Image (cartoon, helix red, strand yellow):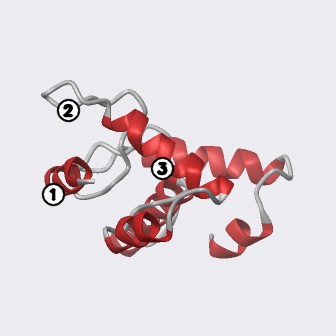
Amino acid sequence: LSRLVRYKEEHGDSLVRSNYETEGGVKLGTWVATQRTAYSKGTLSVDRTQQLEELGFVWDPSTGKWGDNLSRLVRYKEEHGDCLVPWRYETEGGAKLGQWVRNQRTAYSKGALSEERTQRL
């Protein structure tokens, strides 16, 4: 848990890539994936669950990343007045917002975007 705390302090989130290793060779990405699996199976202890939640742990990384991109889109609209993001557009932080918007539009047109996400957009 202490390594995840350090990771969050350095990176600002707990969205550790699955293949991420610390400088000391600890496979933090594997450990994080194990916590998520145990949580989804209901086998993660209440104490560990609480510790991770207090840290702001994201149980479903795809949901967390989606929400982050939605926030980026809101900021884009505030700056540019629309959501017509060029598909090659990247934020200052390197997020490929244009590709994400294109993917959402494609999913919507194929009927693959959930009602909840459609409403949020």
Image quadrant where residue 23 sits: top left
Callout 3 amino acid: Gln
Identify the mark nearer the N-term, 2 or 3.
2
Residue 17: where, in percent of width, then height? 39, 36
For marks 1 and 2, give the CA distance: 14 Å
For the point 28% across and 53% down, the residue is: 1
Q: In the image, 71: left or right of 40?
A: left
Total numbered circles? 3
Image quadrant where residue 21 sits: top left
Examine the rendered structure and indicate whether residue 98 appears above or below residue 14.
Answer: above
Helix, strand or loop status at disc 3: helix
For the point 31% across and 50% down, the residue is: 91
Identify the mark nearer the N-term, 1 or 2.
1
Residue 2 in view in this figure? yes
Q: Which of the image's four quarters has the C terminus? A: bottom right
Give the number of the disc on residue 26.
none
For marks 2 and 3, give the CA distance: 17 Å
Residue 99: where, in percent of width, then height? 52, 41
Examine the rendered structure and indicate whether residue 42 appears above or below residue 7.
Answer: below
Label 1 Cα crowd, 10 Å radius (few <14 / some 14-19 / many 20+): few
Label 3 Cα crowd, 10 Å radius (few <14 / some 14-19 / many 20+): some
**What residue did someone put label 1 on?**
9
Q: Are marks 1 and 2 in contact (CB under 8 Å)?
A: no
Residue 86 in view in this figure? no
**What residue did someone put label 3 on?**
35
For the point 21% across and 51% down, the residue is: 11
**What residue did someone put label 2 on?**
22
Nearest to the observer: residue 89 or residue 17: 17
